[in-house]
Image (cartoon, helix red, strand yellow):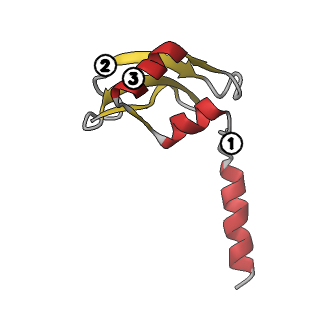
Amino acid sequence: MVRIRLTRIGRKNAPAYRIVVTDKKSKVNGKFIEVIGNYNPTEDPKRVVLKQERFDYWTSVGAQPSDAIVKLVKGTYQFKPYDPKAKKAESVNVEENK
């Protein structure tokens, strides 16, 4: 089965993603058939570069987009940057309530 999904590129603490068409059984950062777009949430979270005609072609042939891709294409995806302090504060509040 062919799948349209994100593959991570970029450096530590600065994620960037490629939108790729790949076999479902291949590794996350393994071989892919075609790159049809990219997404860089650290620069502009609302900007998704996608070759729409290639996306339409692959979906018409039977490729299944992942949940993240569906949200990105519809424009409903909300990028939330990771904040390690928020998790620590949350666990401290839980311990104090005991």
Q: State if disc 1 and disc 3 touch (CB < 8 Å).
A: no
Nearer the N terminus, badge 2 or badge 3? 2
Q: Which residue is mark 1?
A: 80
Nearer the N terminus, badge 3 or badge 1? 3
Dot 3 falls on a residue whose secondary structure is helix
| Residue depicted at 26% across the width and 33% down the height | 26
Q: Residue furthest bottom?
A: 98
Q: Position of residue 95 (x, y in %)?
A: 68, 77
Tell me: 36 left or right of 71: left
Q: Nearer the viewer, residue 63 or 20?
A: 63
Q: Which mark is residue 7?
A: none
Q: Amino acid at mark 1?
A: Lys
Residue 7 figure quarter: top left
Q: Amino acid at mark 3?
A: Trp
Q: Which residue is mark 3?
A: 58
Location of the C terminus (image quadrant): bottom right
Tell me: 31 left or right of 60: left
Q: Which residue is mark 2?
A: 33
| Residue depicted at 48% across the width and 22% down the height | 18
Spatial separation of the CA atoms under disc 3 and disc 1: 29 Å
Q: Amino acid at mark 2?
A: Ile
Q: Position of residue 63 (x, y in %)?
A: 36, 31
